[in-house]
Image (tube, rainbow, N blue to C red):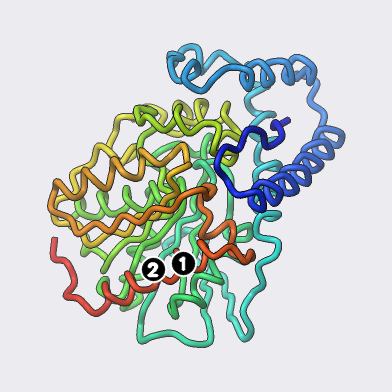
Amino acid sequence: MASDVQHPGQLRTEIIEYLKKCVKNSNKAVIWFALKNRDKAVDLKTLKAKIQEDFGRPFKDRVQMGYVERRTAFTPAELSYLIRLYRVQADSLLKNLMRSATVPKKFSFKRANGNGVAAEWQVPRVVDGNRTILYIHGGGFFVGSVAVYRKGTAALAERFHTRLLSVDYRLAPEHPFPAGLDDCVSAYKWLLSGNISPADIIIAGDSAGGALTLSTLLKLKQSGIPLPRAAVCFSPVTDLTYSGTTWTSNEKTDPIIRFMPSMCYILSVLYAAEAGPKNPLVSPLFGDYRSLPPILIQVSRHEMLYSDATGVAERARKDGVDVTLQEWDGMMHVFQGLGIGTSWPEVSDALTKAKAFIDKAFQSAPTRA
């Protein structure tokens, strides 16, 4: 039920064509789901009309919707069905985007239980010392999994010469805030309980996982828990109030975030729940970054989330944090991970720079909260 990739602006032709193929395949998964999973309480024609109406309005019009409108746009049955449908669609899209990636040779995968949180160790042939990445996948807080992201995270572990613990945190709306954040904090504490020094850990994540990466840092500081060596964020979501200018100005150059516009608004309510979108642990743009470790943020200037990335970088710098902000032109959302199996030079460039940041962080003295 998502629209085709249209009006991509300044994205390169090869990226546009790649996205079109992936969207086409994910739409097939949606049709299969709709045919196999009927719900008597949901009229598909009515639901489709609502979605088409939503897609027909500019993002700037939707951002003015109040919470009551967002809650009542769909019936509870429609919302439940829509979330299941979007999970099929999004998981299919993610798998298709990373379909060209290959798992490195002699790579080890082992399921783990991190303080009751499902996770997976991903270990390459070469690991520099005790370097460990706690990775938090993206997916708008409501889709994604260790399994869906496995090819991408394995490639990162191989590239960075680190072992990686990928976290299957609980997803909204069944488990709203702070469930997912609590899981990420619990997984980090589990690493510490296994005699892994915080100085050997980097927390990393993409999109919603980038938000949870920053929120985890903020929560660890609040709780007086030793902080990790550094953090890496790929295209992080930092502001669920959607106050950033590029949420509207970059709408036509970001087919990934525009892919599911209804869910952007539904989740600003259903993920944030009683905490509300202005809570700093929901929207880390509003957090207190004093005494946090170095942070790397990578983003494309053509993303709707560009202002989220630049805004939080500015906020953290003002609080005295060592922030490295790296930007690229013409690339899609989370191109570093979702384009991991392509030959796009920007992907290699971004990962090379990320590795340089990680190497530098491990060579520097750890931050003391």
**Who is closer to the viewer here, 17 or 158?**
17
Q: Picture quarter containing residue 192?
A: bottom left
Give the amino acid type for the residue marked by disc 2 in the picture: Lys
- The residue that label 1 is drawn on is 349
How far apart are the alpha carbons under marks 2 and 1? 6 Å
**Who is closer to the viewer here, 324 or 271?**
324
In this view, 75 is above or below 37:
above
Marks 2/1 in contact by CB < 8 Å: the verdict is yes
In the displayed orientation, state which residue is furthest to the right: 35
Identify the disc placed on residue 353.
2
Give the amino acid type for the residue marked by disc 1 in the picture: Asp
In this view, 59 is above or below 348:
above
Left or right of 297, for residue 222:
left
Task: Quadrant for the N terminus, please.
Answer: top right
Residue 80 lies, in percent from the top left, at: 64, 28
**Who is closer to the viewer here, 317 or 14?**
14
**Who is closer to the viewer here, 315 or 84?**
315
Task: Identify which residue is drawn at 62% across, 86% down.
Answer: 106
Q: Crowdedness of circle 2 by 10 Å Cα count: few (<14), some, many (20+)?
A: some
Task: Identify which residue is drawn at 32% across, 59% down.
Answer: 296
Identify the disc placed on residue 239.
none
Q: Secondary structure at mark 1?
A: helix
In this view, 59 is above or below 355:
above
Left or right of 366, for residue 232:
right
In this view, 237 is above or below 69:
below
Task: Identify which residue is drawn at 43% across, 71% down.
Answer: 352
Task: Quadrant for the C terminus, please.
Answer: bottom left
Residue 201 lies, in percent from the top left, at: 33, 71
Q: Crowdedness of circle 1 by 10 Å Cα count: few (<14), some, many (20+)?
A: few
Q: Secondary structure at mark 2?
A: helix
Q: Picture quarter containing residue 321?
A: bottom left
